Every structure is written in C-alpha cells, then in structure tokens.
Amino acid sequence: MDVFEAVKQSVTTRQAASFYGIRVGRNGMVCCPFHNDRTPSMKVDSRFYCFGCGASGDVIDFAALLHGLGKREAAVRLAEDFGVSYEKSGNAPPDRKRHNRSQPRQKSAEQRFKETERYCFRVLCDYLRLLEHWKTAYAPQPQDAIWHPLFVEALQRISYTEYLLDILLYGEIEEKAALIAAQGKEVLRLEQRISELAAGNAGSGQKDDGHNGTGADTGRNPGDVRGDAERRREA
C-alpha cells in the first residue's frame, strides 16, 4: 500500500486538525485556517469542507494547504506524524537495499517516545469519536426506564478523554510522559476494543462489546460511526 492509500485509511482530517493544534468542537466544526475566520465555518471529519471560503478535500489536501507542501510531501509528513506504515519505493541498487535491510537503523529514545505519543493520540481520538457517536445514537427516549450502557459510558468518558488529548497536544514533555506511563495499558485495551467493534461492523453488523443489549435497541452496531445519509446510500 502506497503512502497516499495508507494515510487516507489511517488518519482522518479531524485527527490531523487536532494533532496540528487546531481546536475541534464536539460537532466537528473549526475556525478555518485558510482564511480569516472568526467563527467556526469548517467541518472536519474524514474529509473537510469550509462553508466560508469553499476549501475542501481529504486529509492529505488539508495537510498540504496547512503546511504549504506538495501532496506527496504532505502524505509523508502525515505518515511520520501518525506512525503510519507504507510501502516505500526506492531506486537504490539491490546490494545497497540488502545492506540496509541487514542493518536496520536503531531508533533513538526520542523517536520511540514520539511514536508512542502518536499512537496514544490516534487511539484516544478514535475512542472519542465512538463516545460522541454513542452519546447521540443511544440517547434515552422519554419512555426509557434504563439508560443504555454505551450512553452512560459516553457521559462519563468524553470530558476525560478530551482532557487526555489536550495533554498530548499542549502539555509539557513531563506531563505527556506521565500520561503515557499511566494510561499505556488502558490505551492498548481501547485499541483492541475498537478493533473488535470495527471487525463486528464489517462482518455481521452486530458485535457484543461487553454490554448487554449492544446495538439491539437501535438496530445499529456501536462501532458504526457513519451518518444516516451514508447508511441510506449503501442500502
């Protein structure tokens, strides 16, 4: 998979905007960085669109415009910043390629820390998207006597997850290191859970995530964060 495909499958524009210091509202709206925008007029999700200046595109277009880069340079930067693996095509002689493979370059402690930081940020962003989806999809109706567990989880965890992301974005190095040390195992657990939800969504459309009645009362998979319009188009 080349760098363009790998980045588009792994990183959303919303994640990139947050990573590069742009504050994203819970509804996915931001102040457009491409014109003098005083009130949020750009919607960011998997793609982006500005209702003010008309700028639009995918995550690579967004990074290219934001950093003044060509598309390939933007894709490579995104891959590096988010730790996305991709196939690298090179013109080095075969002997040199074999030599490079036999002696992999050792990563510095700083590089390993940055990779871990990006990994935690990516997983927490994915989890926040699910929480925001659950808060809407499983909101109780007037006749509901018991709140859905996923709705309760969303209420309990959204603010804390946003707090952790703020530390990874704006905190001092010591704060980031403390967060990674304290939350590392939890982030691994979250990634596994998110992967299981995604696999269930790609398969039968129903996946037990450890809560009773998961998705049964709404007919939706808890890992399905697509919009209603997209589901109707696929139907």
Image: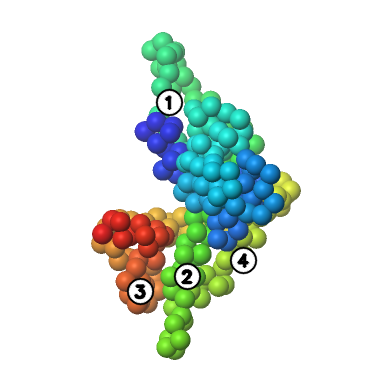
**Residue 88 — which label?**
1
Q: Earlier in the sequence, mark 1 or mark 2?
A: 1
Q: Secondary structure at mark 4?
A: helix
Q: CA distance from mark 3 to mark 2?
A: 11 Å
Does 35 sit above or below residue 64?
Answer: below
- What residue is rendered at 42% in x and 88% in y? 143
Left or right: 225 with respect to 219? Answer: right
Q: Earlier in the sequence, mark 3 or mark 2?
A: 2
- What residue is rendered at 47% in x and 62% in y? 130
Instruction: Give the quarter of the image for residue 33.
Output: top right
From the image, which quarter does the N terminus lie in? Answer: top left
Give x and y (percent) for residue 36.
68, 44
Q: Amino acid at mark 3?
A: Thr
Q: Are there few (<14), some (14-19), or many (20+) residues within 10 Å of tag 2?
A: few
Instruction: Give the quarter of the image for residue 24.
Output: bottom right
Q: Are there few (<14), some (14-19), or many (20+) residues within 10 Å of tag 4?
A: few
Q: CA distance from mark 1 to mark 4?
A: 39 Å
Q: CA distance from mark 3 to mark 1?
A: 44 Å
Give x and y (percent) for residue 140.
46, 80
Q: Amino acid at mark 2?
A: Thr
Q: Amino acid at mark 1?
A: Lys
* Residue tagged 2: 136
* Residue tagged 3: 218
